[in-house]
Image (spheres, rainbow, N blue to C red):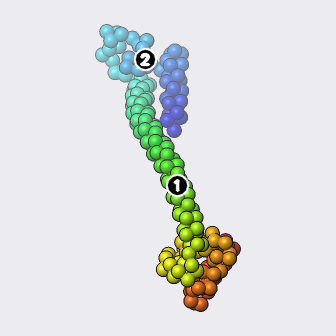
Amino acid sequence: MLRKLIFLSVIMVAALAIAANMGFVKIPFAVAADAAPAGDAQAGAKPTPQETISLEMGKDLQKKQEDLDRREEIVKAKEGQLLALEQDVQKKIDELKRTQVKLEEVVKMRDDLEAKNVANLTKAYSIMPPAEAAQRLKAMDRAIALKVLMAMKTKNSSKILSSLDPQTAAQISEQLAKRQVE
């Protein structure tokens, strides 16, 4: 839109200049650079209707040019603001990516530590008497108990399950079967 207005303004000025050169229109001194000096003989005369129209067109063009200049300044200011916002967003994205990498490292360390702890618990419960291991596994968090039993050799886990009461053994067996399918 701004470019169209500038283009139309340039065309209007060019048309006025051509008309002035051909003698059809006289351009007032405020618009044309080659206008007659102020002390000319026509200084006191009233402008003709053509001159009045030219003067009005010149003022309109000047007003439109000033309006276009203001709009262009506003657009440039908004472009600057958008660029600054874009840079802020990019900085935040980069910061989030760094945070994500750190979190992934922490999760991996936690998973490794958990796997090591499960391995240690598995060793400990494998060498315990089955009845004692059964009571302790029944009291611990079910998810951890399942991990320990899944890590054990089948011979040891079956002895521990047989030492549990039938209802708890059935629940744990069902959960073990579901986990092995996943």
Position of the C terminus, as image quadrant, is bottom right
Which one is nearer the viewer's eye here, 72 or 83?
Answer: 83
Task: Tell me the SS state at disc 2.
Answer: loop
Please, is residue 156 above or below residue 34 in the view?
below
Q: Is residue 37 left or right of residue 162?
A: left
| Lower position in the chain sequence, tag 1 or tag 2 | 2
Q: Is residue 151 left or right of residue 32?
A: right
Image coordinates of residue 97 in percent, x first then y, are 51, 47
Which amino acid is tagged 2?
A: Ala
Residue at the image position 56 percent from the left and 89 percent from the top: 165
| Disc 1 target residue | 109
- Count neighbours of disc 2 (C-alpha within 10 A) and say few if under 14, some if 14 to 19, many if 20 or more: some
Per the model, the C-alpha gap separating discs 1 and 2 is: 79 Å
Q: Which mark is residue 127?
A: none
Which amino acid is tagged 1?
A: Met
From this viewpoint, is residue 55 visible? yes
Residue at the image position 49 percent from the left and 46 percent from the top: 98
| Disc 2 target residue | 32
Numbered label tally: 2
